[in-house]
Image: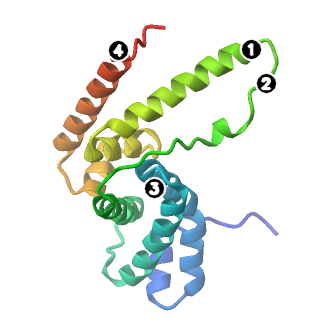
């Protein structure tokens, strides 16, 4: 048997609407990790992210008949996830940010490069903290660009903004991060 051919997201959505539950399962398996990672970074809580990740896919299925197959599934799905995250953050009132980085789960090594690794981890922690201090919309745009690698037009669609508004959010986010980095004595 050869390798399994990857069915496009739009085709899976069409099959799902027609009653093929396996098509929905494939979409969840394909997109669960990126959606979860985005939600963890938005919310700062793995538990909240897990809840909202499940809710995102429930809403995906409930809204499937409204989806217009146009090759924009990723943007549509992340719009659902982003709306869920913003709603949770509004309800929470106080934004809590817990650092979460898969790469930081390993203990530092005792090798000669351990000092360099500790410095890199400190810098990563500072960057995560700086990102956490960004206004919600700037943080969302930055996370979609840097971690989900979406294009400006896709971010605009996810966030319900114009491309120029997204560019301005990202510009302001980068300025704020640079200012924060300089304020913390980031000239290492």
Task: Report the disc number at residue 182.
Answer: 4
How far apart, in angstroms, are the residues tagged by discs 4 and 2? 29 Å
The kind of secondary structure element at disc 1 is loop
Task: Report the disc number at residue 109.
Answer: 2
Figure label count: 4
Res 66 quadrant in image: bottom left
- The answer to whether the residue labelled 2 contacts the one labelled 1, judged by CB atoms less than 8 Å apart, is yes
- Label 3 crowd (10 A; few <14 / some 14-19 / many >=20): many
x%, y% of residue 160? 22, 57
Where, quadrant-wise, is the N terminus in this rendering?
Answer: bottom right
Q: Nearer the viewer, residue 160 or 180?
A: 180
Q: Which residue is mark 3?
A: 39
How far apart, in angstroms, are the residues tagged by discs 2 and 1? 8 Å
Q: Residue at x 50, y 45 (%)?
A: 98
Task: Report the disc number at residue 105.
Answer: none
Q: Which residue is mark 1?
A: 113
């Amino acid at each position: 048997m050869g390798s399994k051919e990857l069915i496009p997201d739009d085709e899976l959505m069409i099959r799902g609407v027609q009653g093929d539950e396996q098509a929905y399962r494939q979409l969840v398996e394909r997109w669960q990790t990126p959606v979860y990672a985005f939600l963890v970074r938005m919310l700062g809580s793995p538990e909240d992210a897990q809840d909202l990740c499940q809710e995102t896919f429930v809403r995906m299925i409930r809204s499937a008949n409204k989806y217009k197959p146009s090759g924009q599934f990723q943007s549509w799905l992340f719009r659902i996830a982003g709306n869920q995250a913003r709603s949770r953050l509004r309800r929470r009132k106080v934004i809590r940010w817990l650092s979460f980085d898969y790469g930081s789960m390993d203990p530092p090594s005792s090798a000669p490069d351990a000092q360099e690794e500790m410095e890199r981890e400190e810098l990563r922690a500072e960057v995560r903290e700086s990102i956490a201090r960004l206004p919600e919309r700037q943080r969302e745009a930055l996370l979609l660009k840097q971690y989900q690698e979406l294009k400006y037009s896709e971010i605009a669609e996810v966030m319900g903004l114009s491309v120029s508004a997204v560019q301005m959010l990202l510009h302001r986010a980068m300025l704020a991060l640079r200012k924060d980095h300089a304020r913390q004595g980031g000239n290492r």
